[in-house]
Image: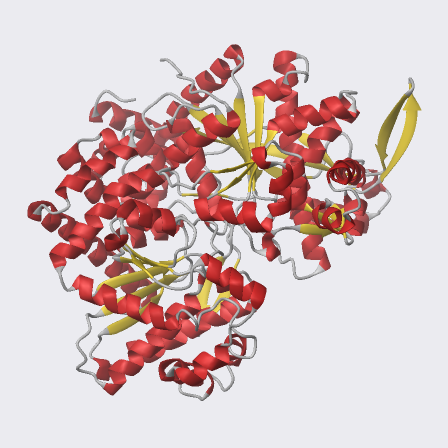
Amino acid sequence: MFDSKESLKRVLLDKLQTMQGKCLEEAAPIDFYRALGGVGRDYISRNWVKTETYYRKKGVKQVYYFSMEFLVGRLLGSNLLNLGVLELCREVLRELGMELEELEELEPDAGLGNGGLGRLAACFLDSLASLELPGHGCGIRYKYGHFEQKIIHGYQVEVPDNWLREGNIWEFRRGDRAQVVRFGGIVRAETVNERLTFIHEDYDPVVAVPYDTPVIGYKNMTVNTLRLWNAETGGREFDFSSYSHLDYQRAVAYKYNTEAISEILYPDDSNHQGRLLRLKQQYFLVSAGMQGIVASHKKRYGTLENFGDKVVIHVNDTHPVLAIPELMRILIDGEGMGWEQAWQITTGTISYTNHTILAEALEKWPVEMFKNLLPRIFLIVEEINQRFCLELWKLYPGDWDRIGRMAVIADGYVKMAHLAIVGSHSVNGVAKIHTEILKKKEMKNFYQVYPHKFNNKTNGITHRRWLLKANPDLAGLITNVIGNSWIKHPADLMALRRFAEDHSFQEKLAHIKHQNKLALAWLISEETGTLVDSSSIFDVQIKRLHGYKRQLLNALYIMHLYNRLLEDPDWDVIPRTFIFGAKAAPSYHQAKLTIKLINTIAQQVNNDKTIKEKIKVIFIPNYRVSLAEKIISAAEVSQQISTAGKEASGTGNMKLMMNGAITVGTLDGANIEIRDEVGDDNIVTFGLKETQVLDYYHYGGYCSWQIYHQDERVKKVLDQLVNGWLPASQGEFRNLFISLLHNNDEFFVLKDFDEYVQAQLRVDRLYRNPQQWQKMSAINIAHAGRFSSDRTIAEYAAGIWQVEPVTIDE
């Protein structure tokens, strides 16, 4: 990219003048950030054009990954890393009186997701480009990302995250490629040339404008695209005459309703208007995205007859599943194809990843809402359902109960997961246990009909972002010991196994971890005002806050530990710092109450001098990608304690093990595969197995009150929730008490409590032997290559998408 520091310095200073209108002496850090981003953008754009031109000329098959979330975070550092100029830029900036890290902090996190689903999509895009695979992302350009979280008096307070306030240096607006998405209206049928056609009239048009962000591969020429759609008013199909007729109210309402579509990630769906907006968002994404892909394809080939041979549409969970009827609409209404041909192309083109077995996340939409908002799409879904039910009738004649359970439309709802399975050629889970649960339980009926569709693709993370970028000192140590082949071939990390017992390597590993802990301790002090001991165990639970993820179990254990120390302040326990980072959905009151509990415990514990600072509790507000990078590199214990069978896969577990943290976890999701990789001696497992959980749900037999009365530790901490022992208002945590006892502990927090206590005691014993701990840490890092998203994407490419790497030459 650049021959020397001098050439980079020259280009950077020139960009500072031409882009910011400032000389070196006048420039502020924000000017340097924009100038450096502009330099990178210029270079990336050249390769971007080359990549698009090559794909077009060679007619290669391309993947389009549809997702409601892309949690990409900050891009400056990762882009410079992938360009191979990160260290060069750091040196040049330092000579100019600037620190690269200071500039990175000026970039807002692109928080277009709320957890693992969106971060997975971002990791997948990185791996697609780095493996030279032609694959792009398709999402929504939310004006406000996942909310900014403030903690006020221990409570979560949501503040809008206006991440676009200062613009986005990485995106390109493509106004010439805008599409019109239609909502509402009526559909009438006409016979034209002996063919039944459908005409959509009186609809509300929304203009979808794409904003493209380049996605660059690691040290190659490939630059793919993340296309995010923005909802706007205007366009040829909108009549502004309403303004001249003084119909301001209607015009303003139209503008508001239109722009609201891309205003905010996941609007509150606890009311009708919120759910309607979510459905609008989902159709907006797939209609705009599909129309854009079709337009590009027709421009290249002049026909859609070969669409399935050249295009892959992958839907990330149920949110984009309306891609199925939308493609059918385009093929039938726009191209005049018959149903059978259109269906063959659609099912051959679309593949689907399921991310959950939670009933609340298996989306379904009221028929009336769906029909009124999307009248033509509803007719197509209705036809899909009728044909599918007829197919089932042939297989199971007279079995109306089974057919009703499997129907796409039933009980007054359109069931999106059912539509996804019926209308795609591949259905994959994201961990071995998750896929087996889908096949044997949650989607057993569908598996019996379509066994060939179901497959597993265990999730992965991009090791370039989560190790090479987030933990450069550890990455440097690894490279010094085994060479740098692991950066492009993460399976080569396995070579570290032979150094796991090397004392010199262990000392260096421990030193790097301690330096990262010092950095995190400083950040904690800045963010929360609390001083923590960097020699204590850094015990980390960072993830979306949800009942099944069981932050509550962790909190109750801390209360128990505190009780032990109150009884015996001299109890010999390794000092531990419990670190939480999590956001709760704004309408999820139980989760928000758990945040309040954690902060209340922190208030009590952190200010009690009698326990001699043996435990500290830290809740770092506004958990996000850039914060995760700092926490993960410093973590020593990784809490992965979901109720067995509830976590589809998890990816935080992979990021933490890759940075040397030891997993404390249930046998759930990818924890099982981590255990299989590292062995029982290098992970700490506990709790109910998935089959036991399913048996309790199915047959009953669990009584949380029984545990309350039998286990004095449990009784004590639960009583402390409601007896005024905690520094909170009277009755503050009564709903948590009720959920655990009166509602019989849906996620088996109390059932797993004793084994969790024993697991934590095991951690304490292991940590007392530094050599044993560093050996475990090294083994976890060595086996983390198995969980790179490069491996996952290679499996998708070969097993589902049938796409090949395409090398873009100089």
The color scheme shown is: secondary structure
Q: Can you give x and y, in whole percent of width and height, for residue 571 in the image?
A: 19, 80
User: Measuring 13% from the left and 61% from the top, which residue is drawn there?
Assistant: 769
Between 682 and 364, the residue placed more toward the observer is 682
Residue 192 located left or right of residue 209: right
Q: Can you give x and y, in whole percent of width and height, for residue 402 in the image?
A: 72, 49
Q: Can you give x and y, in whole percent of width and height, for residue 695 in the image?
A: 52, 63
| Image quadrant in which the C terminus is located | top left
Counting every numbered tag in the picture gives 0
Residue 36: quadrant of the picture:
top left
Residue 77: quadrant of the picture:
top left
Between 573 and 98, the residue placed more toward the observer is 573
Residue 8 located left or right of residue 585: left
**Can see residue 629?**
no
Residue 753 located left or right of residue 175: left
User: Measuring 39% from the left and 37% from the top, which residue is drawn there?
Assistant: 789
| Image quadrant in which the N terminus is located | top left
Q: Can you give x and y, in whole percent of width and height, for residue 96 in the image?
A: 22, 37
Between 362 and 19, the residue placed more toward the observer is 362
**Can see residue 541?**
yes
Furthest residue toward top: 57
Residue 677 located left or right of residue 126: left
Above or below, comparing residue 632 to residue 549 in the picture:
above
